[in-house]
Amino acid sequence: MGASPLRTHHVQFAGAGSQPMMFAHGYGCDQSMWRFLAPHFEDRFQTVCFDYLGFGNSDTSQYDSSRYTNLEGYARDVVDIASAAKLRDIIFVGHSVSCMIGFLAQQMEPELFSHLILLVPSACYLNEPSGYQGGFNREDLEGLLDLMERNDLGWASVLAPIVMANEERPELTAELKESFCAADPLAARDFARATFFSDNREDLKPLQTPPLIIQCRDDRVSPQSAIDLVHQKIRGSERQCLPIGGHCPHMTHPSETATLIDAYLINQNLPRTGC
């Protein structure tokens, strides 16, 4: 018998509610990145945080590179965690690439999920000659992967300031860089390829319950055109824009992010947080 997904992914539960609210971190991060946001919801929901394999306190001995050639492998992890914990009616909160991972997981097992909350989503991070701006030129990403292949941790110094993009909070940029560097090198490379070179635009479709999309006004990782496409493809989705920079609103502006989520939950007739 294989290891339990709950141990493998270092799943942590908190909160007083019965309905689960699952938080899925972005590339190169771990569940600690939710420490500013998840507590806002613990008075009404059961919060569920986890680490993708190779990150945080996950059991890297269980890592199988062949499973993670695309985002479907990470989506299967989400489903496995939910199944192992016997979770139903999950409110899934995904950051960055985990927005698309959560969307794919919902497509795999729709009965497990009730709502999706997508923080700065993108279905394709590559710029195209057609005019689509995903945020990155292919040659720049190939250069990033080359640094990672050579175990040159300089890639973390390049990427962290772009992602965090809040110069007045240098400690958060330093934390993100440290998280990048602490990741298992093979897992980090695989996740980078799956994140930055996947194109899941054709996978997007309307959902029975429209999701919430939260964007940041100035975000180099998920620019306006990327958010526009996700919003257009998932017809009926609610989009809210925070007047801030960066790609990590749950860390740089957790109260403002929680307020938008709470308003969405109220509109969906779900319990309001007490914060």
Image (tube, rainbow, N blue to C red):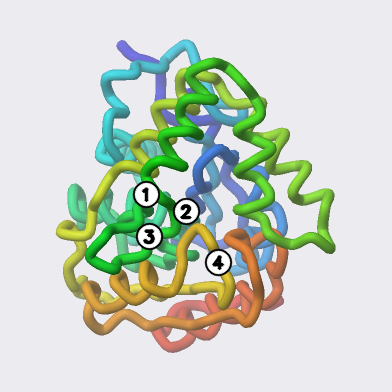
Residue at mark 4 to residue at mark 1: CA–CA distance: 33 Å
Tell me, yes or no, whether the two marked residues, 4 and 1, touch with CB atoms within 8 Å. no
| N-term-proximal mark, 2 vs 3 | 2
Residue at mark 3 to residue at mark 1: CA–CA distance: 34 Å
Q: Position of residue 248 (x, y in %)?
A: 61, 59
| N-term-proximal mark, 2 vs 4 | 2
Neighbourhood count class around disc 3 (C-alpha, 10 Å): few under 14, some 14–19, many 20 upward: many
Residue type at numbered disc 1:
Leu
- Residue found at x 37% / y 49%: 87
Neighbourhood count class around disc 4 (C-alpha, 10 Å): few under 14, some 14–19, many 20 upward: many
| N-term-proximal mark, 4 vs 3 | 3
Say which element carries label 1: loop
| N-term-proximal mark, 3 vs 1 | 1
Say which element carries label 2: strand
- Mark carried by residue 87: 1
From the viewer's side, name the closer residue of 45 and 36: 36
Residue at mark 2 to residue at mark 4: CA–CA distance: 24 Å
Neighbourhood count class around disc 1 (C-alpha, 10 Å): few under 14, some 14–19, many 20 upward: some
Query: In the picture, residue 141 is in which quadrant?
Result: top left
- Mark carried by residue 134: 3
Residue at mark 4 to residue at mark 3: CA–CA distance: 11 Å
| N-term-proximal mark, 1 vs 2 | 2
Residue type at numbered disc 3:
Gly
Say which element carries label 4: loop
Residue at mark 2 to residue at mark 3: CA–CA distance: 26 Å
Tell me, yes or no, whether the two marked residues, 4 and 3, touch with CB atoms within 8 Å. no
Q: Nearer the viewer, mark 4 or mark 1?
A: 4
- Residue found at x 40% / y 41%: 139
Q: Position of residue 183 (x, y in %)?
A: 59, 26
- Mark carried by residue 232: none
Tell me, yes or no, whether the two marked residues, 2 and 3, touch with CB atoms within 8 Å. no
Q: Which residue is mark 2?
A: 22
